[in-house]
Amino acid sequence: MRLLAAHLRKLVRRPASWVTLVLLLALLALIYLALIAGARTSGDPQTALGARLFVTFPAAYELVLTLILGIGGLLAVTYGAAIAGSEWGWGTLKSAVARGESRTRYTLLNYVAVAILVVVGLVVAFLLGVAGSAAGAVVLNSSLDGMGDRDGLLRLPELLARASLALAMNTAFGFAIATVARSQLAGIAVGVGLFFAEGIAGLFLPDVFQWFPFSAASAVTAAGSGAGLGGGGAVVATQLDPDTAIVAVVVWLVVALGITALFTERAEIGG
Amino acid sequence: MTAGSGVALATQGLTKRYGSRVALDGLDLRVPEGVVYGFLGPNGAGKTTTMRILTGLVRQDAGSVELLGRPFGRGDRRRLFDVGALIESPAFYPFLSGRENLRSLAATGAGVPAGRIEELLTLVNLRERANDRVSGYSLGMKQRLGIAASLLSDPRLLLLDEPANGLDPAGIVGMRDTLRALAAAGKTVFVSSHILSEVQQLVDVVGIIAQGRLVREGPVETLLREEGSIRVRVAADEVAAAAATMATVAGAGSVTTELGPEAGWLSVRLDPSRAGEVNRALAGTGIFASRIEAGTNLEALFLGLTASRPAGSQGAAGPPDAPAAAPPTGWKA
């Protein structure tokens, strides 16, 4: 526990944690502003309908999470890569190993700490998103009655858990890539590249790429499946149902953490 | 030398290759307990690779390591709980303060007693800057913090790679004082350094490696005596006669004459305590030396053993006895 606590303390003090959270919140705010402004000024009924969906509760809860999964998925990859890569770049993993610390324990607990912060970020972003939807409802003269819908509220823990798992998997992927690359920059670059490459490839071979990590992660909520944002934020016809997507996400999570542990354990640590 | 009967660290046939390059080629080391051991070698000789193997960062291709009396191999990471290390440059999170970095590191490996961090910050004279971010530290301050980090768990064996890097003179004196005190308390300090004059003042035993192999190991005093030389300056027209006379004392082929700016100097490889005998022999043949220097230093020994003296240089060993260092005054900012 003391190592996990140390990792958490370190991450809370790390500028990258706050920059990532602020970036996520800023992007969300921007999207809401655009959505509401578009709905008020555009005569396009499709735009108005889209905006209405985001401000109509309880469906808005799920849409907000899907939106966060799309933007936050990419940020989770880069954040995971930044944290894992810096352990190699700064030599701090070396110091821990030289003190007799278990490589796998150190690295996986570091991941757990990162995942905890990612989930906290998800909750904060979700609250901001819900507030944005509520504000949008007021501006667009939509009813807020659905906010207190009992069924909708009862589903929230499950939705948040699914989204958390998806973001944790994205984080694990960034973590694994940076660990293999042993570099913060390379990890981020390759992680972002894979994220977008998967999204683009999914446009052409959706049946295959729906099983890939970032596409599966975007399908863990019902609103995400069917027309999820997919890897790279591209709108793809994701066909996985949410429960199947969860299984795929768990498999990818285990694979990513397995790669991380295996590589860290076997690596020759220099520099 | 305060060596105990045990061996703190030993390697046998340690071999490591990086592709086609041989970093270590059957390295055999034997570090007694309770000494400061100087691990010397030219760049690329394999010092850092050895340090990495000793701390489990890298695995050897062949050979064995024994740490604190027991074999150290894969799966023996807990043996490092009794080892403190500073390998290459000190590694810290730049966005955390010095104190926070030590706290973070203390959460790994062996437990760290309460109050230990403050004690170490005081020891390395970083207490006043302990709350500053490490990104604002100078190289010397990071090095001090690195040494503090290596001492976190009060290790029985300390492995320090170039610990004097970036330290100012007061810092070097403070470090020397600390390491000597640790050895006096029965701990073993294994230190690599390029600052040979510093090493000579600090260590009890020295191991010199070149091209991945041990070329000499032993107590510093013994090595210096065995590798000692006597230098004599005579008039230029007496060099040949002086060489012949000195050869009668030290044996044929043991005398070298120096050229260029050093012309008039003769060197003979001989126990420095026999300088008077050489002087007497020269005087007996009517040759009176204008200067006689006896002894050697670690630098001359190192350069001779590793053949890393710059090409063209014929300079002999420097003054035999380096001036004594000022009394240790602790770590100054």
Image (cartoon, helix red, strand yellow):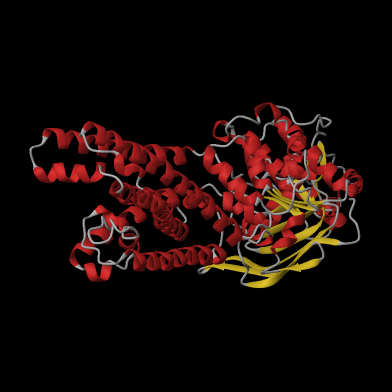
Q: Position of residue B295 (x, y in %)?
A: 82, 45
Residue at horizontal 33 percent and vertical 59 percent from the top: A214
* Depicted A23 relative to depicted A235: above or below: above
Q: Position of residue B101 (x, y in %)?
A: 62, 40
* Depicted B8 relative to depicted B131: above or below: below
Residue at horizontal 91 percent and vertical 45 percent from the top: B276
- Residue A108 visible in rendering: yes
Q: In this image, A39 relative to B193: left or right?
A: left
- Residue A193: image quadrant is bottom left
Q: Nearer the viewer, residue A259 or B205?
A: A259
- Residue A269: image quadrant is bottom right
- Residue B308 visible in rendering: no
Q: Nearer the viewer, residue B129 or B257?
A: B129
Q: Position of residue A92 (x, y in %)?
A: 58, 49
Quarter of the image where the C terminus of chain B is located: top right
Q: Nearer the viewer, residue B267 or A192?
A: A192
- Residue B104: image quadrant is top right
Q: Which residue is outermost to the left? A: A43
Residue at horizontal 89 percent and vertical 55 percent from the top: B3
Q: In this image, A176 relative to B82: left or right?
A: left
Q: Which residue is outermost to the bottom? A: B62
Q: Position of residue A104 (x, y in %)?
A: 58, 62
